């Protein structure tokens, strides 16, 4: 059975995590993330038996899932469900994905409430109505309660519609707002309000 004869830390490349070269019986074997070596409980003099190899394999999968998730989150804040879907497409196992997502939630890197709030605000600023915003949040995998909290933080739909219709309340402008998810009743109220003024 091969024995670990050296664990040599390699200088990390820019933007990459620290890696360790594992030597078995005096020969280089693998270069792996340092956190996987630590969590697998590897040390110089330990035999690389079946249990040690399984532990290392499990930790390598978890490290890869975390690395993939962090890389994705650098570009865009995602909900837990969307990030889980990305990791699944990259081949991460269920238990590995769950562990990685739990760790990222504990660290505050995955936060569905923050995603819901930011996405709702962004869509409202781009002229979308409540129905379209709810639909987008549902598509992100945001829980109904979090979606409602995010919606409650927005200006009321009627106020947003009135701001968007300041330039004119012609049928074309109303159709545009209806296509962007504004409720027909809200649009009727806004047009009725303008008629009364």
Image (spheres, grey):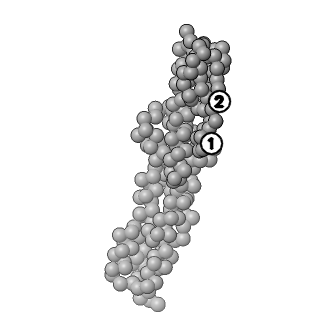
Q: What is the count of numbered marks? A: 2
For marks 2 and 1 on the same chain, the one whose residue lies earlier in the sequence: 2
Q: Secondary structure at mark 2?
A: strand
Residue 36 position, x and y percent, is 59, 29
Q: Residue at x 51, y 53 (%)?
A: 76
Q: Which residue is mark 2?
A: 9
Does residue 104 lie above or below 145 as drawn?
above
Residue 30 position, x and y percent, is 54, 25
Q: Residue at x 57, y 49 (%)?
A: 111
For the question of whether residue 34 can be seen, the reply is no
Does residue 32 lie above or below 175 as drawn?
above
Residue 60 image-quadrant placement:
top right
Q: Nearer the viewer, residue 131 or 71?
A: 71
Q: Residue at x 43, y 74 (%)?
A: 186
Q: Nearer the viewer, residue 61 or 106?
A: 61
For the question of whether residue 176 can be seen, the reply is yes
Q: Residue at x 45, y 71 (%)?
A: 127
**On residue 106, which mark appears?**
1
Tag nearer the camera, 2 or 1:
2
**On residue 46, which mark appears?**
none
**In the image, is 162 to the left or to the right of 20?**
left
Residue lying at the far front of the rendered structure: 27
Does residue 39 lie above or below 149 as drawn?
above
Q: CA distance from mark 2 to mark 1?
A: 28 Å
């Amino acid at each position: 059975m091969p024995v670990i004869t050296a664990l040599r830390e390699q200088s990390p490349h820019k933007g990459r995590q620290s890696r360790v070269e594992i030597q078995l019986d005096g020969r280089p074997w693998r270069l792996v993330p340092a956190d996987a070596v630590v969590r697998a409980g590897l040390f110089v003099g330990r035999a690389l038996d079946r249990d040690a190899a399984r532990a290392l394999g499990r930790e390598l999968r978890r490290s890869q899932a975390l690395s993939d998730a962090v890389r994705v989150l650098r570009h865009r804040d995602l909900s837990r469900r969307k990030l889980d879907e990305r990791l699944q497409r990259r081949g991460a196992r269920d238990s590995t994905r769950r562990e990685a997502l739990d760790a990222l939630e504990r660290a505050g890197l995955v936060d569905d409430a923050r995603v819901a709030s930011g996405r709702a605000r962004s869509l409202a600023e781009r002229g979308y109505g409540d129905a379209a915003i709810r639909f987008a949040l549902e598509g992100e995998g945001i829980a109904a309660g979090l979606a409602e909290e995010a919606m409650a933080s927005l200006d009321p739909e009627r106020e947003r519609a009135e701001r968007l219709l300041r330039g004119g309340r012609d049928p074309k402008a109303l159709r545009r707002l209806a296509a962007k998810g504004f409720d027909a009743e809200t649009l009727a109220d806004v047009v009725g309000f303008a008629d009364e003024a």
